[in-house]
């Protein structure tokens, strides 16, 4: 539980862009590319569980605190088709970071969203709207409500048995709190090199750029650079376990928003 509203707000202002590298795992990108197999609507549960050690629980420049946390990211999705190359998705999602010691770093969010995706020359091109609710603590202190409008493109390439999954996404965020509004660009590349039918080496370099537009963050510009490297084991085509190490660095024209952090741990990905 957050000790005070002010503490929660100050933490949020410092780390509002602190998305972990796991957000850009190869499995997450494959879930975005996924097209429903038939015209009939299908319901699925997609998610990940990840016990992770980090050396910077608060995304701080000067006061790094290491800790273990458990991330759970679960979505319920309804997928269907309007046409052979035009699909839709309606979904709800819950994402939680629960820390072992640094309870003030606990964070959670819930959202609902809708997406249209079309196949264009082998690329999955999509338009998405999300209504997002962010909290300090585990659904404790409501920090802000956001309305995200996004456009994205992604696909898979296979070269010499190595799978490359480029992903690009642009977004504008409206919010009931002006400090949370921004333009954002995401560039990511999922890489998977199979060793055999079950084992593979995976990596997910990504880049994010933010241009904040309102409130205390007006004029702020951030860039996040990250790369992860890990080993993946496929239990089934829809369940896998990846153990990885990820390095992340944020540059900013607001000096106090700069940080570096390292995350290490396994994450279990599943889709049913």
Image (tube, rainbow, N blue to C red):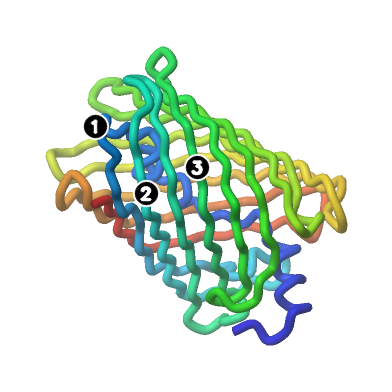
Residue that extends furthest to the bottom in the rendered view of this protein: 3
Q: Element at badge 3?
A: strand
- Which numbered disc, 3 or 2, marks the residue that appears first in the sequence? 2
117 in relation to 4, above or below = above
The spot of residue 149 in percent (x, y) is: 63, 39
* Mark 3 vs 2: CB contact within 8 A: no
| Image disc number at residue 114 | 3
Residue 55 falls left or right of residue 15: left
In the rendered view, would you say 96 is above or below 101? above
Q: CA distance from mark 1 to mark 3?
A: 19 Å
Indicate left or right for 239 with 23 as reference: left
Q: CB of mark 1 within 8 Å of CB of mark 3? A: no
Within 10 Å of disc 2 (Cα), the crowding (few <14, some 14-19, many 20+) is: many
The disc label shown at residue 272, or none? none
Mark 1 or mark 2: which comes first in sequence?
Answer: 1
Instruction: Say which element carries label 2.
Output: strand
Relative to 43, say whether 187 is above or below. above
- What residue sits 22% from the left and 52% below the top? 239
Picture quarter with the N terminus: bottom right
Mark sitting on residue 37? 1
For disc 2, the marked residue is 77
Q: Dot 3 surroundings within 10 Å: few (below 14), some, or many (20 or more)? A: some
User: Could you tell which of marks 1 and 3 lies nearer the N-terminus?
Assistant: 1
The residue nearer to you, when weighing 13 against 231, is: 13
Give how far across and how far down residue 168 sits, in percent. Answer: 54, 31
- At x 46%, y 45%, the residue is 24
User: What is the CA distance from the residue labelled 1 to the residue labelled 2?
Assistant: 14 Å
């Amino acid at each position: 539980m957050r000790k005070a509203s002010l503490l929660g707000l100050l933490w949020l202002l410092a780390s509002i862009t602190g998305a972990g590298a796991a957000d850009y795992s190869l499995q997450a990108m494959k879930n975005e590319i996924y097209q429903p197999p038939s015209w009939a609507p299908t319901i699925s549960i997609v998610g990940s569980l990840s016990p992770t050690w980090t050396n910077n629980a608060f995304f701080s420049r000067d006061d790094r605190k290491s800790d273990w946390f458990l991330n759970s990211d679960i979505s319920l999705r309804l997928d269907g088709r309007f046409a052979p190359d035009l699909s839709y998705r309606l979904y709800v999602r819950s994402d939680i970071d629960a820390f072992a010691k640094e309870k003030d770093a606990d964070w959670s969010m819930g959202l609902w969203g809708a997406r249209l995706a079309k196949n264009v020359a082998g690329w999955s091109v999509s338009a998405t709207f999300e209504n997002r609710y962010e909290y300090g603590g585990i659904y404790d202190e409501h920090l802000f409500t956001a309305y995200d409008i996004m456009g994205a493109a992604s696909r898979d390439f296979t070269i010499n048995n190595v799978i490359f999954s480029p992903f690009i996404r642009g977004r504008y965020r409206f919010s009931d709190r002006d400090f949370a509004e921004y333009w954002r660009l995401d560039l990511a590349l999922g890489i998977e090199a199979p060793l055999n039918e079950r084992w593979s080496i995976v990596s997910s370099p990504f880049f994010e750029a933010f241009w904040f537009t309102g409130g205390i963050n007006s004029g702020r510009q951030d860039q996040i650079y990250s790369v992860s490297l890990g080993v993946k084991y496929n239990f089934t085509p829809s369940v896998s376990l990846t153990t990885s190490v990820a390095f992340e660095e944020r540059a900013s024209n607001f000096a106090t928003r700069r940080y570096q952090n390292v995350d290490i741990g396994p994450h279990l990905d599943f889709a049913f």
